[in-house]
Image (cartoon, rainbow, N blue to C red):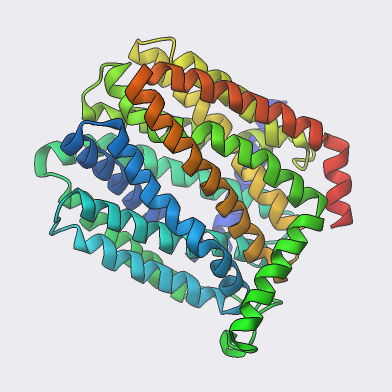
Amino acid sequence: MLAPRLTAAATSYGEVIRSPRYFPLWLGQLVSNFGDTLHYIALVVLVFQLSGQGLAVAGLVVAEVIPVLLLGPIAGVIIDRFSRKAVLIGADLFRAALVLSLLWPQGVWHAYVVAAGLAAGGTFFGPTVNAVIPVLTTPEQRLAANSVSWSTGRLVQILAASIAGGIIALVGVSAAFAVNAASFLVSAGLIAALAIPPHAGQLGGGTKGGLGAYFADARAGLEYARRDPLLSRLLIVQSLASFAVGGTGAMLVVLSERHLHQPPEGFAWLIGAIGVGALVGPLIPNTFAGDYRNARWLFVPYVIRGIGDVLIAVFTPLPIALLILFVYGLNTSTGMVVFNSTIQGAIPDAVRGRAFTLLDVSWSAMRLVSLGLAALIVDRVGIEPLYWLGGSLLAVAGVLGLALLGGERLRAVERAS
């Protein structure tokens, strides 16, 4: 019984990849994910080596969060008013230029500035990708499209993580930054060849109505989120989940050194284990879900990952930690592909950019609060209590999601949308 299901899932993956409407976007993201993984590991290792403090690592993540909070509201309006193809290409070129500047690093502050700039570009890029997938795929292909993007993205993450430590040790961090800059340029070139039709809210030139119209559009997006039963409940649950994982995600490199007793380069192995789990995870709903639009597929992974965060702070052997992080990646990717596929199907095209940026802003705001508390906990009482607390809160978020959006209610909400 399992083999035919796996075959069917693999077939749906192949059909999506071969689609000329989706292939350039998928390939561009694949190349970019490779560069992003090298860049992320190099940047975290660089900042931690220079400072030796959890607070400095938290500061790096804060630099990534603030642009999302500041730009998110206007980014959603721009995504819904301008050509989404132009937004994608512009974000890639902007990030390529930023990363190239790290070939001549000026200090830790420079790393923070680049991290903030990359986050600013991502504030426009990520929600735009989620907004265009529904117009590049059929409803039957949507889960497979999100799944293949995550699975193959995690495959290159594994490859990049496996060589990151060696590259950093042999030639330093500059090579990782050069590869990432090149990956953004490749992505921009592939997107330029992509046919993305005008969307429902797009205006000629995107300037009609002046500044007042932009604010009106932003308010309309907030009002839609308040009224929509699916989106409003998801914002509540996601905010609690972000508060739970914001600190633990940022402090993984600290856990690696102080709890697992690994050298800084060993952090790459932890990222690789998460990547392996994330590679396999999307196969689960594609293989076993009769209808993936069910709250269990969204929130049970929260509970399992929360338990994992508690356990990784209990055990110190590296093999056990890698196994826990594998399960961590498995559940994160399963929940994410279902989350994106559900939102893409339920939110109208005209407000889809604002919906996804609002979700990003709420996630980032709670992540910022979590980081501040995490830095205090780590520097005063140690890394283990942070993971015990964060894991427990994430499990609570999963239970809350199941209570607010039970399986039958979630399907009813989607039909109403």
Residue that extends furthest to the left in the rendered view of this protein: 170
Above or below for 95 versus 303: below
Quarter of the image with the N terminus is top right
Q: What residue appears at the point 27 percent right and 68 percent down from the top-left corner?
A: 97
Horizontal and vertical percent for residue 296? 74, 31
In the figure, is residue 373 to the left or right of 198?
A: left
Q: What residue appears at the point 25 percent right and 31 percent down from the top-left corner?
A: 53
In the figure, is residue 130 to the left or right of 185?
A: right
Quarter of the image with the C terminus is bottom right
Horizontal and vertical percent for residue 200? 71, 77
> Does residue 348 appear in the picture of this structure?
yes
Kindly indicate the quadrant of the structure image that contains residue 52.
Answer: top left
Horizontal and vertical percent for residue 337? 62, 44
In the figure, is residue 348 to the left or right of 97?
A: right
Q: How many numbered marks have been drawn onto this rendered protein structure?
A: 0
In the figure, is residue 50 to the left or right of 361?
A: left
Above or below for 251 versus 94: above
Horizontal and vertical percent for residue 117? 35, 61
Kindly indicate the quadrant of the structure image that contains residue 233.
Answer: top right
Q: What residue appears at the point 34 percent right and 63 percent down from the top-left corner?
A: 184
Kindly indicate the quadrant of the structure image that contains residue 399.
Answer: top right
> Does residue 28 appear in the picture of this structure?
no
Q: What residue appears at the point 32 percent right and 30 percent down from the top-left corner?
A: 253
